[in-house]
Amino acid sequence: MKQRGIGSEIFSWIKTIALAFIFAYIITQHIVVNAWVPSGSMERSIMTGDRVVAFRLSYLMSTPDRFDVVVFRFPDDPSKLFVKRVIGLPGETINIVDGRVFINNANRPLDDDPFVTYGDYESYGPFVVPEGHYFMLGDNRINSEDSRRWDTPFVERDQILGRVIFKYYRGFGFIN
């Protein structure tokens, strides 16, 4: 059996580690986004301190749908990542009356009961969502800094980094 020299063994380890870093870089920059949720704004779906993984390729051939949970660059400070639920789509009018969301002056509120924690019975709007933009709300409406309160209330399509697939760290769960 042929014995390898210490130099070739070290080179083999360096090559393996370098490939691992390159592979990790490609995955995190082009395939997934890893984000931390520091507040209770998404509670019921995602708890304070949870980490989430979003799939960057989710919207390669499609656009975000209503109720998708997404990671995006905060419109008022693009250096920050936010996690919220898509509520308003491009061209829609959003009106929040006594805490309930109405789209395009519909007679019935949006059916978001499966994931929303109510308690905020204020009224906001109307907000007319510009083309190429989205209106975001947190699931914990009473404790969420979201499109209702931002200086720039709409998120541009190209600022949406990916759709959240699952949460982890303090418990694993798929997000729908």
Image (tube, rainbow, N blue to C red):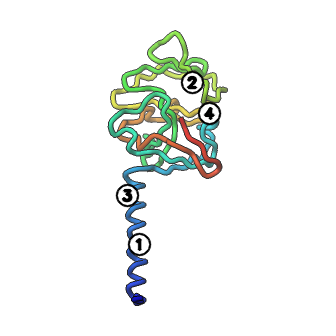
Element at label 2: loop
How far apart marks 4 and 2 lie (CA) works out to 11 Å
Mark 4 or 2: the one toward you = 2
Q: Earlier in the sequence, mark 4 or mark 2?
A: 2
- The picture places residue 79, in percent across and down from the top left corner, at 44, 50
Q: Residue at x 43, y 77 (%)?
A: 13
Vertical arrangement, residue 38 with respect to residue 4, above or below: above
Give amino acid for label 2: Asp
Mark 2 or 3: the one toward you = 3
| Residue that label 1 marks | 16
Element at label 1: helix
| Residue that label 4 marks | 140
How far apart marks 1 and 2 lie (CA) works out to 48 Å
| Residue that label 2 marks | 112
| Residue that label 3 marks | 26
Q: Earlier in the sequence, mark 3 or mark 1?
A: 1
How far apart marks 1 and 4 lie (CA) works out to 44 Å
Vertical arrangement, residue 96 with respect to residue 141, above or below: above
Q: Quadrant of the N terminus?
A: bottom left
